Amino acid sequence: MSTPLTRALRPLRLLLPFLAIGMALVLFLTVGFLAFSPNLGGGRSNAAWCDTGISTATVGRGGGGATFETLSDEQRQNAAAIISVAKDMQLPPKAWLIALATAMQESTLRNIDYGDRDSLGLFQQRPSQGWGTPAQVTDPAYSSRIFYERLMEVPGWDSMPVTKAAQTVQRSAFPDAYAKWEGLAASLVENIGDVANPTGCAPGTTGALPPGVAGAAIGFALGELGKPYVWGATGPDSWDCSSLLQASYRAAGVTIPRVSRDQYNSGGHLPVRDMQPGDFLFYAHDTSDPTTIYHVMMYLGDGRMVEAPNRNFPVRVQPVSWEFGDLVPLATRPGTTPNPA
């Protein structure tokens, strides 16, 4: 029997199938977004990664000439433990590389029971700073896991240079010191982690060196990562900004001047935003006057450069500071015909 109430509800009953379909669609889209959206903060990233600060020319080289072959059994075992934890956590090789470079800098991959203040273990973690008990931070598995957990909390860690990601976790007094271990860490990822391409870079990216002169020059410069800056030094153990780049191009068969101001005119000029790997960019006190140039760097591509910056930092890879007021608007392509006066 029809009543006023049932008559009032009849339109609602007709809408129920459509409401159900709508709710299912909303649920599907929400789950799809969560499943396929990019990594918006910290946490695991399954995206492809490429570290353009590491090239095939530097894989295997570490500070002080250390190589995979020169490491002791203890060091290799600790490297294997660090990689094993990362695999258990299903982290990509970029995370392994960061952890290995960090442990090489902090302890040379030795599980030591001493350090600065109360720092202990492979990563020199401090119990007083919440890293764990002394027993925990000297356990390779625990110390590796908590390092990775802290790394996963760093937004964008997987797109950072290795040394920056390591420094963000460690907060070291020597923030660029990790750079000199990137090549050796890549070799450990390759040899112990069984990763065929530890740079993560496909052919044709800036991590794989460009062909010809520019590639040879970049390869030389990246091979000097971690060496100290000394004003007036010309290598091979230390460099200043212009001697590093002069030696890099000399290794590629191109002769350029020694001083940065002269290097500005060692080839054709082009806008810095149009640079290609191997080009030089400059800082000057007056960006309209090349005679005031005081620093030169080599562009690597992907917004990054290699430089011997100053006595406070070793040879390193850094992002280009596009907005820095001292950046000269024109770059130089060494070895090409200079622009007409």
Image (cartoon, rainbow, N blue to C red):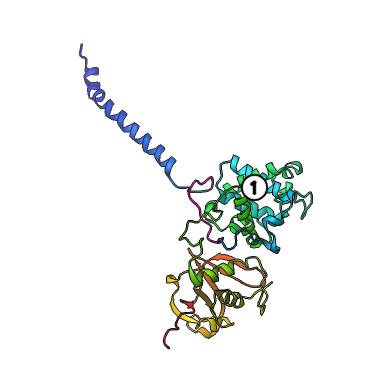
In this view, the residue farthest toward the right is 114
Q: Quadrant of the C terminus?
A: bottom left
Our reading of the magenta stretch's main secondary structure is: loop
In terms of image quadrants, where is residue 316?
bottom right
Q: Is residue 270 left or right of residue 253?
A: left
Residue 53 colored in magenta in the image: yes
Q: Is residue 88 left or right of residue 113?
A: left
Q: Position of residue 243 (x, y in %)?
A: 61, 77
Q: Position of residue 309 (x, y in %)?
A: 61, 71
Q: Measured along the vertical axis of the image, is residue 165 above or below residue 234?
A: above
In this view, the residue farthest toward the bottom is 341
In this view, the residue farthest toward the top is 1
Residue at 40% x, 39% y is 32
Which element carries disc 1, helix, strand or loop?
A: helix
Q: Position of residue 191 (x, y in %)?
A: 62, 50
Q: Measured along the vertical axis of the image, is residue 176 above or below residue 274?
A: above
- What residue range appears in magenta? 42-55
Residue indicated by mark 1: 147
Q: Measured along the vertical axis of the image, is residue 309 above or below residue 53?
A: below
Q: Quadrant of the N terminus?
A: top left
In terms of image quadrants, where is residue 11?
top left
Residue at 25% x, 27% y is 15
Residue 82 appears in the picture as rendered: yes
Residue at 65% x, 59% y is 181
Residue 323 appears in the picture as rendered: no
Q: Is residue 29 left or right of residue 200?
A: left
Q: Nearer the viewer, residue 35 or 299?
A: 299
